[in-house]
């Protein structure tokens, strides 16, 4: 078992921001930072299946799409890219685009990319703190300005840009049209509360994303799978001997790890590669369960069935 502070890599982007506080002390003055990538501290360790990020949008991102596993492997890449967003903060009027507002043909999509009218085809909607958005591979999507979010994704940096607001960056029209779903995205599944402390935000074919809300002064055992990421959104805790505070991430490489929660409690995202939530992930070291086991088991069974149906 390994417990390590994730190293942080700042990615400079034309749509990024200069001030990343309170999430990071990285200085974006003069060269805006758009993303913080959390990586394993041990550079010789096996490459993780997932990539955890923080995104900061000072301007709109490109309208883009990612390939699924089948298309990516046909291009010689190990896998495609499905992702999920958790909105940490959003300025008034901030919006995202997910899917299309009507069904079109691939030929219509190509024409809309060429003449720029794809902006009108995207389904735009406002976002607020706490919103959760799952972006399956093949979904046309975009982020507007004024948003801070956490993203968990399959480890892939393959992005096909369809529209870039006049920036001098390459578009990927042929591949984008080939992989894009040319219809509206189905209604999102609402988060599922497993216990007072655990909420499943996304349970997909490739990963599970949960929100933990642990009370102050409590003690827990985290029974982690071989790859588990913990990102602190608020409060403090110690996972094993590693201190965790806002904007920091810890990688747990399987086994049992203790969580000692600080005086302000801990709100954190937890992500791991799986197709359904791990029922035994979190155990309180003292006191009784806050919810009947039968209710948790029923929710897990339902989520497992939904995940299998999506594969």
Image: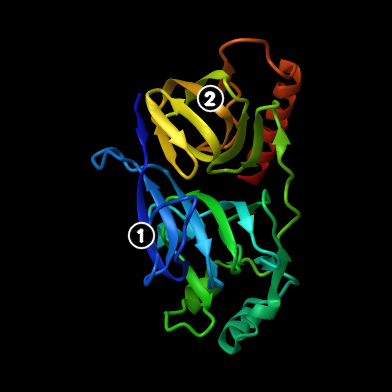
Residue 143 numbered tag: none
Nearest the camera: 181 or 231?
231
Dot 2, how many residues are within 10 Å of its Cα: few (below 14), some (14-19), or many (20+)?
A: many
Residue bearing mark 2 = 261
Q: How many marks?
A: 2
Image: 139 above or below 164: above
* Image position of 267 with respect to 39: above or below: above
**Residue 66 appears in the picture as rendered:** no
Please tell me in which quadrant of the rendered image residue 226 appears.
top left
Residue 107 can be seen in this image: yes
Q: Which residue is located at x 54 percent, y 19 percent?
A: 220
Seen in the image, is 41 located left or right of residue 16?
left
- x%, y% of residue 105? 67, 77
From the image, which quarter does the C terminus lie in?
A: top right
Residue 12: where, in percent of width, then height?
A: 38, 66
Spatial distance from mark 1 to mark 2, Cα to Cα? 44 Å
Taking the view exactly as shown, the residue that stands out farthest to the top is: 287
Q: Residues within 10 Å of mark 1 (few under 14, many from 20)?
A: few
Mark before the other along the chain sequence, 1 or 2 = 1
On the picture, is 183 further left or further right than 17?
right
> Where does label 1 land, which residue?
76
Q: The N terminus is located in which quarter?
A: top left
Name the front one of labels 1 and 2: 2
- Tell me, yes or no, whether the two marked residues, 1 and 2, touch with CB atoms within 8 Å: no
Badge 2 marks a residue whose secondary structure is strand
């Amino acid at each position: 078992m390994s417990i390590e502070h994730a190293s942080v890599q700042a990615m400079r982007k034309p749509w990024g921001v200069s001030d990343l506080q309170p999430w990071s002390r990285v200085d974006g003055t003069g060269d805006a930072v758009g993303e913080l990538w959390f990586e394993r501290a041990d550079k010789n360790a096996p490459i993780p299946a997932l990539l955890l990020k923080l995104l900061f949008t000072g301007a709109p991102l490109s309208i883009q799409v990612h390939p699924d596993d089948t298309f990516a492997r046909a291009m010689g890449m190990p896998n495609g890219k499905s992702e999920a967003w958790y909105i940490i903060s959003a300025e008034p009027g901030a919006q995202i685009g997910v899917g299309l507002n009507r069904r079109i043909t691939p030929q219509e999509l190509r024409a809309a990319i060429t003449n720029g009218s794809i902006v009108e085809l995207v389904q735009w909607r406002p976002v607020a703190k706490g919103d959760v958005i799952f972006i399956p591979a093949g979904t046309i999507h975009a982020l507007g300005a004024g948003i801070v979010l956490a993203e968990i994704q399959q480890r892939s940096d393959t992005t096909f840009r369809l529209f870039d607001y006049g920036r001098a960056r390459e578009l990927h029209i042929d591949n984008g049209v080939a992989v894009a779903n040319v219809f509206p995205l189905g209604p999102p599944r609402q988060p599922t509360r497993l216990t007072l402390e655990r909420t499943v935000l996304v349970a997909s074919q490739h990963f599970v994303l949960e929100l933990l809300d642990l009370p102050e002064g409590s003690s827990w055992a985290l029974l982690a799978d071989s790859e588990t990421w913990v990102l602190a959104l608020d409060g403090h805790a110690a996972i094993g001997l590693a201190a965790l505070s806002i904007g920091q991430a810890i990688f747990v490489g399987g086994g049992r790890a203790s969580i000692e929660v600080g005086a302000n409690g801990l709100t954190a995202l937890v992500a791991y590669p799986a197709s359904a939530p791990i029922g035994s992930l979190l155990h309180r070291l003292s006191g009784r369960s806050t919810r009947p086991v039968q209710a948790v088991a029923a929710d897990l069974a339902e989520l497992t069935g939904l995940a299998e149906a999506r594969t």
